[in-house]
Amino acid sequence: MTSVHPASAPAPVMGAGIGLKPQYYRSVLENREAGLWVEVHPENYMTAGGPRHAWLEAIRRDRPLSLHGVALSLGGAERPDRGHLKKLRALADRYQPELMSEHLAWCAHDGTYFGDLLPTPYTRDQLDRFCAHVSETQDALGRAILIENPSIYLPLKAEMTEQEFLAEAVERTGCGLLLDINNVFVTSWNLGQDPHGYIDALPAAAIGEIHLAGHEQDENLGDKLLIDTHGAPVRDEVWALYDYAIERIGPKPTLIERDSNLPAFETLMAECMRAQAILDTLAAEPAHA
C-alpha cells in the first residue's frame, strides 16, 4: 500500500491533540492550530476503504497521527490474534503513525471478545506472559509500541507494584509507556495510594505519550469509587497531576481523550489548548544547570 505520509519525511512536532471522532472530521481538517495531532482506535479503520478512510487520509496529510489499540488483549492468557496483528500492520504501513499504543489489560478469551479492558494480576508468571505478547506484537508490527497504565477499582493479586510491572516490561521488551494521568488519579483514589509517588516510580525516559480524560463518581457509592468514563471534562485535580508529571518528565505529546458525551469541537479544543499552554510554558523555561 502507498503511504499517505512517507516514513522518510521528518516527524512533525506533536503538542496537544484530540481523539478523532467522525463528528470532528471536518473541524479538524479545517483547523490551523499548530502542533495539533489526532489519535484513532485502529479497530475502527480495519477496512480497505470507505468514508472513514477518505477523511483520515485527508487529515493525515496535515496532522500527526497516533493509533491507540483496544483489542489486542496483551494481558490475556492467549497470544495476540495473528489476523488482528496482520490488519494492524497493514493500517500502520498505510498511515505511518508517529505513535502506536495498547493497554496493560485483557479483553478476549477463547474466541470471545468482552468489550471491556479488564485488569491483570501483577505476578511474575503474568509478567512473563505479557512481555511475550508485547514482543510478538512489536515483531509483527516492525516497531515499538507504548503501553498504557489501567484504571483499577479493587486491589489485584500482586507480587509487585504496577509501576514495577511496567518498568520491567519496558526493560525486557523495549516498549514505551503511555501515561494516562486520569487513570493514575482514579486508581490512586480508589486504592488509597499516592498518585505523585506512582509517577515518580515510573521510568520517565520510557514515557512517549500522555492521556488526559474525565472521570465521574459511581452512581451508588459516590466519591468512594471513581470511574474512568472518558465522558466528562478533565477534572482540576487531574490537571494539577498533569502539571506535576510534565515538570518531572518534560513535555510529551498529550491527548485529550473523550469517547462519550462528546462536546462541541470548540469545547474540546479549549481543553486541548489548555494542555498546549502548559506544554509551551514548560518548553519555554530555561534549562537548569
Image (cartoon, rainbow, N blue to C red):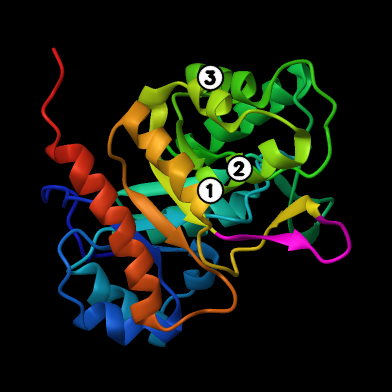
Amino acid tagged 3: Ala
Q: Could you give the CA–CA distance between mark 3 and mark 2, rounded to whole angstroms?
A: 15 Å
Residue 44: mark? none
Q: Disc 2 designates what residue? A: 185
- Indicate the amino acid at tag 2: Phe
Which residue is at 38% across, 40% downward? 243
Q: Residue at x 53, y 55 (%)?
A: 69
Q: CA distance from mark 1 to mark 2?
A: 8 Å
> Considering the image in quadrants, where does the C terminus appear?
top left
Q: Nearer the viewer, mark 1 or mark 2?
A: 1
Q: Secondary structure at mark 1?
A: helix
The answer to which of 207 and 1 lies nearer the viewer is: 207
Q: Residues within 10 Å of mark 2 (few under 14, many from 20)?
A: many
Res. 201 mark: 3
Percent position of residue 166, x then y: 58, 26
User: Which residues fall within the magenta stretch?
Assistant: 214-222
Q: Is residue 258 left or right of residue 158?
A: left
Task: Judge whether residue 96 can be spotted in this image.
Answer: no
SS at badge 2:
helix
Tell me which residue sits at (52%, 79%) in the image.
Answer: 262
* Observer-nearest of 140 and 178: 178
Q: Check if mark 1's residue and mark 2's residue have beta carbons within 8 Å.
A: yes
Mark nearer the N terminus (1 vs 2):
2
